[in-house]
Image (spheres, helix red, strand yellow):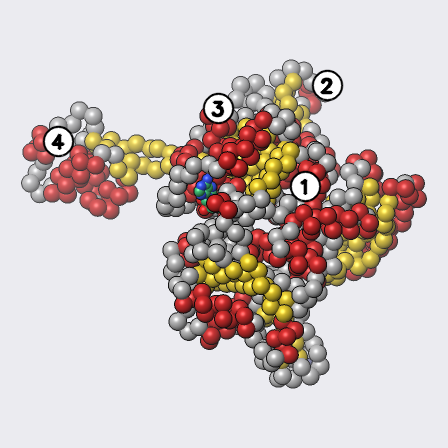
Amino acid sequence: MFAEVIVDIIHYEVDKIFEYSFSDCNVQLGSRVLVPFGAKYVEGIVIKINDESNYPIEKIKPVYKVLEETPALTKESISLMEYVTKSCYVTKASALRLFLPSEMRKGRIKEKFTLFAELKENIDVDKVISALKSSAKKQRDCILFLGENGKTELSFLNKEFGSSAVKSLKDKEIISVITEQTFRSPYKNLGNTGKQVVLTNNQLSAIDSIVNTDKEITLLHGVTGSGKTEIYLNLIDRAIKDGKSAIMLVPEISLTPQMLAQLRARFSENVSILHSGLSAGERFDEWWRIRNKEANIVIGARSAIFAPIENIGIIIIDEEHDGSYISESSPRYNTIDVASFRAKYNGGKIVLGSATPSVESYLLAKNGEYNLVELKDRINKKPLPEVEIADMRNEVRRGNNSPFSSVLKSELSDCLNKGNQAILFLNQRGYSRTVICTECGHVQKCSDCDVSLTYHYEDNSLLCHYCGAKYKMIDKCTNCGSKYLKYGGIGTEKIVLELHKLFPQAKILRMDRDTTQSKEGHFSILSAFARHEADILVGTQMIAKGHDFPSVTLVGILDADMSLHFADYRSAERTFQLITQVAGRSGRADETGKVVLQTYQPDNLVLKRAIQYDYEGFYKEEIAIRKATAFPPYTDIVRILISSESEDDALIVTKAVYQELSFVHETYRDKFRFFGCMKAPIKKLQNKYRFQVLMRINAKDKDLTDKIFITVNKYKSSHVNVVMEINSNNLS
Ligand code: ADP
Ligand code: ZN
Ligand code: ZN
C-alpha cells in the first residue's frame, strides 16, 4: 500500500505531496507518521491512501513509524486543510499546523501517566495487619488508609507513609501498583453558575427561526442583555440531544471561563476547552478528549474552530463582529469562512451573535443570504442604560485637567455611596502613551520599531507595545539631554492612581494585558469583581465584551474618540461597536444603569448613533459611505507587505513587485478601484523595514487574487518577506 504524505516543513519548495509505502495496518488516513526525508526523519500526515503508485517501486521509501494509533486528523480536517491552503494562500504544511496542538508536533508532550496503588483484591485487612511486626506501624497505617480510601496516588502514599513501607507492602504483594492516564484539565474550580431560566417568547421564537430556517447561517442581532447566551445554550442542548456536537466561540480568552462555567453546569464533562492560554499539557489532553469523542462540545477562541470534532450540529460565533475572528498571522483565515466550510461538510448550522453586527454580516442578512433574527429588547424589557455625554472641551475650558469630567466624578461618588460597582474603560494600557521632551520635542521610540514607547509606572520602564521590547525609564531626553520630560496620553495605570486620590476608600481592580499575564489572570480579576471584592474595575477592551456583572450601575468611557482617529476604514464601525459593548455592561440587573461618555467631539455622528443605541441608523450611514468610497464589503483590500532588515533590498523588491503588478492592473483595469505603492504606516517593525502595495479590487474575485498571489509570491526570499493580506484587520 502507498501513503500520500505532507511533511511538516513550511517551505514552498517542499509544498508537495510525497509518497511512501507501508505494510503496517496502523497507517491510516490522517495518521501522523515519521518518514525518511533526505538524510533525516520528519513528521508528516497521511492525506491519502492508494493501492498502487505511479512511481517506480524501488524509488519509494517506506513509512518509518506511525506516531499514534488514532489518526490525528479526521477526513474532514484533510478537506478543510485543502480549503485553507487555497483560500489563504499558504503551504499545506502551514495549513496542517492549524489542526494539531503545537506541542504534539515533534513529540514535545505526551499523555500524562500516574502511578496508583491499591490493596490487592482478596486481601483481608485484619488478617494482614495482625501478621505484621508490631514495629511496622507505617505499613499498618498505609493498609488501613487504602482499606478506607481505595486507590490512591503512589506519590501521596510515599510521602505519607514513607517509600520503604510502601515498597515492602508491594514486595509482600499486599498492594499492587497500577499506571493510569490522568487528564490535565483546565479551570477545575469555576464554581457552579448554572441558573434555570424559563425562556421568554422572544427567545423561543428566535430559537424556532434558527432551527427551522433552511439557510446555513443565522445572524442573531440582539441588544446587549437580550438573553442571547440562553439561546446559545438551548441550541447546543438540541444539537447534543440529536446526537450531534457543537462548537462555541467567543472573541477573547478572557471570556472562556465564564462561558465554560455555564456550559459545564449544563453539560458537565461533555465540554472541553481549547485556546492558546492553556498549558501545553492541558491543551494536549483536551484535544485528545475531543478527538476520542469523550467531549462533544468545544468552547474556545478563534483557533477552536479547527477542533477535531465530528458530526457538528451547530457552530456559534458570539460577538461575531469582533476583529479577533480574523487571523492576523499566516494562515490569515476568517473564522466565519472556516465555520461555513465545516457547517456545509457536516450539514450543521451557524449562529452569528452580536449586538452590533459587522456591516459585512448585516448586509448579507439584509440581502437574504443569512437568516436574520433580531431581539430589540433586554430581558424583562429592562431599559438600556442612559448615556450622558461629557464634553471634554468644556472641562478643559473650566480648568479641569483631570481625566475625569465633573459629571463622571459625581456619578462615581453616587454609585460608590450606594454600594454599587462601576466600570471605567480606556483602551490604553500603561501609564502614559508616550514620553516627550519639552525642550526638543523628541518622542522616545523603540530602537527596533518606528513606534513610540509607552511608560509603565509599575516597573518603571518604557515598553514597545508592538514588539514587546522593554527599556529602562529615562531621566533625561536621549536626544538633547534635557531633564524636562512630559507624559502624553493617559493609560489605565494612571487612571487607577488618579482614582485612588479621588476615592481613597474605594477598592480598585485593573484589567489589561499587563495584569492578566498568568493563565487564569483574567478569570481571577473578573471573579473577584463579580464577588464585589472591588468597587471599580478599570480596563481596556478586555472588559468591554460579554461580561455580566449585576451590580454594575455605572460605566465610564474615558476617551470615546480614541478609535475614531485611526486612519482605517473600519474606525467608525469599531467605535460604534466598542461604545455599545461597554455601555451594555451597565444596569444588567434590577437597577437602571448609567453611562458617561467623555469626548472632544460631542457632535460626531457615530457617537450620536451609539448613545442612542441606533444600530440601524448607524448601519445605513456607514454602508452608504462604504459604497460611495468603494471600501469593503463592496471591494476587497489586498495588501502586499514587503519587509526586510535591509531597507534597500525591501525597496528593490517593492519596486519590482509594483512593476509586475502594474501589468496585472493594466489588464484588469475595470476590476481595480485603487492601486498604489508606499511605505507602510509603521515603517519599521522588529528591525524590519516595511513597504506596501495596496489595491482595492472587486469583492471576492478569487481569480484575480490568485493572479496577484502568483505574481508576488516568487519575490519571497530568505531575507525579504513578501506577504499578501486580504481585508486584514490591521493595516499598520
Ligand atoms: P446577552 O448575551 O444578549 O448580552 P445574556 O444572555 O447575558 O444577554 O442575558 C442577560 C441576563 O438575562 C443574564 O443575567 C441572563 O441570565 C438573564 N436571562 C437570560 N434569559 C433569561 C430568561 N428567559 N429569564 C430570566 N433571565 C434571563
Ligand atoms: Zn530633548
Ligand atoms: Zn519595538
Of helix, strand and loop, which one carries label 4? Answer: helix
Do labels 2 and 1 touch, CB within 8 Å? no
Classify the position of ligand 2 by quadrant: top left, top right, bottom left or bottom right. bottom right
Q: Residue furthest right?
A: 666
Q: Is residue 314 left or right of residue 676?
A: left
Please say whether residue 286 is visible from this viewpoint: no
Q: Which residue is mark 1?
A: 361
Do labels 3 and 2 touch, CB within 8 Å? no
Neighbour tally class for label 3: few under 14, some 14-19, many 20 plus, Cα within 10 Å: few
Total number of numbered labels? Answer: 4
| Quadrant where the N terminus is found in the figure | top right
Of marks 4 and 3, which one's residue comes earlier in the chain? 4
| Quadrant where the C terminus is found in the figure | bottom right
At x 21%, y 39%, the residue is 166
Mark in front: 4 vs 3: 3
User: In the image, residue 23 lies at what x, y percent?
Assistant: 57, 18
Of helix, strand and loop, which one carries label 3? Answer: loop
Q: Is residue 252 left or right of residue 193?
A: right
User: In the image, residue 204 lies at what x, y percent?
Assistant: 51, 33
Of marks 2 and 1, which one's residue comes earlier in the chain? 2
The answer to whether mark 3 is within 8 Å of ligand 1 is no
The Cα atoms of the two marked residues, 1 and 3, are separated by 30 Å
Q: Which residue is mark 4?
A: 125
Relative height, residue 158 to residue 22 (above, below): below
